[in-house]
Amino acid sequence: MKLENMSLKAKLILYIVIGTLAVLLISTAMTISTVTTQEENLAYKQATEMAKNYASEFNGDMEKNMAIAETIAVSMSSYDSLSREETSNMLYDLLVEHPDLLGTYVAYEPNAFDGEDELYVNSSGHDATGRFVPYWNKIGGDIQLNPLVNYDKLDYYQLPKETKRTAITQPYYYEGVFMVSFVSPIMKDNEFQGISGVDVSLNYLNDEISTVKAFDTGYAFMVDDRGVLVAYPYNKELIGEKTLYDFGIEELSTVSEDILSGNSGHVETIDPTTGEDVVMFYEPVTTGNFSFILVIPKDEIFAGVQNLSNKLLLISLAAVLFMGGFSYLIALSFNKTITDIVHDFKTISKDAVKGNLSTRAETNVEKDFKEIPIGLNEILEAVVTPVRDTIRLTKSLSRGKLSDRSKLEAKGEFKQLANTLDTLAESLDTMIEDSNRVLTAFQHNDFSQKIEVHGEGDFGKLTEGIEKTRITLAQIMDERKKLEEVRKKEIHHRIKNNLQVISSLLDLESEKFDDDAVIEAFRESQNRVVSMALVHEELYKSQDMESIDFSDYLMKLVNELSYSYMMEKENIKVKLDLDIVFIDMETAIPLGMIVNEIISNSLKHAFAPEEEGEIFVYLDLTNGKLTLTVGDNGRGFPEGMDFTQTESLGLQLVTTLTAQINGTIELDRNKGTKFKIRLK
């Protein structure tokens, strides 16, 4: 069944019930997920803290054993008066006082104890070398004294000797006992004398480990930094023989690598003994090369989490069922009121179709729905009033009374209806006024004033005719302007050509003379003509025929002058730094001639023959002020000479032309000659 074909009652029930259930289900799922995640984190944290606490306890035992070994070393370093017998008795007393110890001992370098090793060869606590190496131990059960053996190659002696530091050996078997040695170097005056140490059987670790319980069936074991089992409650024959790598479980290999690096952590894996899914938590025992590993079955560590999830699920299910039923009852209560309102709508619409706008809706309904029939009745009143006013106004317009307007205080589209009728009367006056404005502009040759008010229908023919006339006249004026621009271009083109002819004639005429001064005068005149011709050439190429790109003009002028003089001044470089500036012809021609005169003077007088130098032209436009700088780094303008009073025609032209364009000119004699012309 399609949704659009369902009854309102069915839709209400569907939407309310499904919407409520969806919200409850989503919120329930999020709540369960959040709570279970928190519980899981709490379980992990609890197990991690348990592993840390056990590791700390074992670390305390290791520190105690290490402290005994260090105390013996300090005592032997501090007291020189102890005899071999007194030292041996001290070791015996320590072994008796500390039942957890397996053995106590010292081992001295040859003759390091008292220099009398040869007197003690093969005596009690000595070997065939006579070295003092007493080893009190309980390996056989009772306390006995034996000389230490293999000290020349085993770690318990060689490690502190090499490092000069306290050390713990790797677990090892000695006479059938799995043990570890805590050894400390005996030093005098920073010289190694021997070692002191205690042996601890690792059987006590296994006894302690067997008492560890985690949750219901969890257990613990210990390994050294190589991953070798040193305490294991199951399969004790594996102790000292098997490593974590040997179990062939990838996660245990990763744990072994972490332990080797001294790291802690946890990993989900398979118990190599039971085959169950477990979580292993491992913590380093900081004193010694061991790590404590706590093994807890996953179903035990998450048992509380699962119970909590089940309880939350039952509570949520009950809430969903309750809210679903409650939502169904709410939907039914909504439906009755809505059905009554729909019936009123049908009755009013049928009467409206027949032209009867007096029918009204029943307003005696539930409070929350009361605004619907009241609003419907207000709509009917709002429709009837504009209809009656429209009938009155259209009758007035049909009689030619264009001054009559709507008197209705309407809103929205009803207001638009009244405004439309008012606009009809106003549009005629507006069109006449707008057309008169355009026609008045025609009388003053202004054809840019467009018809702004365009009528429609027959009124449109009037406004369209006036607009077409305006466009035609505007096109005629545009054609006249284009012809005027062509005429101006032709004038500038001819002036440029005539100036070029004059330049060529001056060039030809100069060839008739041998006097350098006369030839130079011809060349100066020729350059002045070229500077004016370039202005007309730029105007001819410009878009508005009124202004030129002066920066482009200056580059061309400098090129012309360079071509004119560079045959003689090949070592002179020209530097340009020009802002893009557009100026009119009245300013461009004088400025161009000024640049021509100054650069010509620089090329002629600033540098000796074959001398290298630089001529520069800068054009800067800042805050509406134009600054033209022209100069060189040559020999400089003569001191004491006033450039405004010189008899040189070129400098007279520079001064006169600057005044002609209302500019100011300055001369800077520092490092050559620099003229700076400023214009507003």
Image: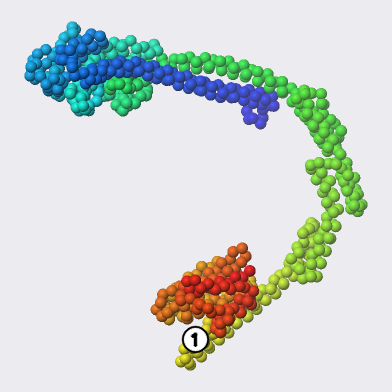
Q: For the image shown, how many numbered marks are present on the structure?
A: 1
Residue visible at 69% across and 26% down in the picture = 7
- Position above or below: 622 against 80: below
Q: Nearer the viewer, residue 434 or 655?
A: 655
The reply to whether residue 471 is in sight is yes
Left or right: 502 in relation to 359? left
Regarding mark 1 in the picture, which secondary structure is present there? helix
Which amino acid, mark 1?
A: Glu
Residue 581, by quadrant, is: bottom right
The reply to whether residue 238 is in sight is no
- Position above or below: 653 against 321: below
Residue visible at 74% across and 65% down in the picture = 448
Left or right: 476 in relation to 65? right
Q: Which residue is the site of mark 1? A: 520
Residue visible at 61% across and 73% down in the picture = 664
Residue at the far front: name it.
81
Residue visible at 78% across and 29% down in the picture = 371
